[in-house]
Image (spheres, rainbow, N blue to C red):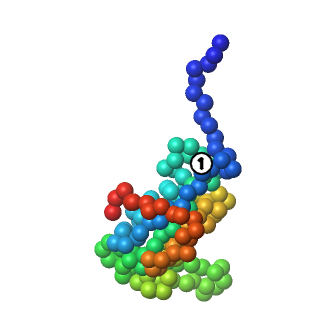
Amino acid sequence: MESSAKITKSLRKEDADKKWWVVDATNQTLGRLSSQVAALIRGKHKAHFTPHVDCGDFVIVINADKIQIKGKRFEQKEYMEHSGYPGGVKIRTFRNMIVSNPAWIIETAVRGMLPKSKLGRKMCKNIKAYAGGEHPHQAQQPKIYELKYN
């Protein structure tokens, strides 16, 4: 007798079809952009999404220096790191980071939205952010990804 039950397929990492996307961060809100990029990197937009496999795509974010945040956060948002040694606290403000290293801001926001595991750390390597409008990944033939909301 044949069963009519549907079988859930689990994707293997060898079977993952990884694509390259370009996202333009011009006048986009940091959190909204980061959540969509994290979903692309994770592979949640695919029909064969498998939570325990890196089946997501590569994402290139351009114009990271033109990212927006709302309200007083431009003045007040801080990034804190601690080296583990006494007095080893480093506090950087958003205002300083948007000038010195805007790509780091986007990479940090996306990293915070990925799983906190070995797989999440591996997925963090699938984002490439650049301050200007140019990127060195033309050989991968990336496609432009239109963000769903601003």
Which residue appears at 44% of the width and 66% of the height? 23
Q: Amino acid at mark 1?
A: Pro
Does residue 34 appear in this view? no
81 vs 61, left or right, is: right
Residue in front for this viewpoint, 24 or 67: 24
Question: Looking at this view, is 111 or 131 the one in front?
Answer: 131
Can you name the residue that lies furthest to the left here? 71
Q: Residue at x 62, y 37 (%)?
A: 9
Image coordinates of residue 35 in percent, x first then y, are: 45, 60
Q: How many marks?
A: 1
Q: Residue at x 36, y 69 (%)?
A: 28
Disc 1 crowd rating (10 Å Cα; few below 14, some 14-19, many 20+) is some
Residue 72 image offset from top left, x and y in percent: 32, 77
* Quarter of the image with the N terminus in it: top right
Residue 79 picture location, percent across and down: 49, 77
Say above or below: 72 vs 110.
Answer: below
Determine which residue is flagged by label 1: 51
Q: Is residue 100 visible?
A: yes
- Where is residue 95? Give x, y as percent: 41, 84
Mark 1 lies on a secondary structure that is loop
Would you say 35 lies left or right of 70 here?
A: right
Residue 78's quadrant in the figure? bottom left
Point 51% across, 50% down: residue: 44
Quarter of the figure with the C terminus: bottom left
Query: 36 or 22, which lies in front?
Result: 22
Compared to residue 26, the image places residue 55 above or below, namely above
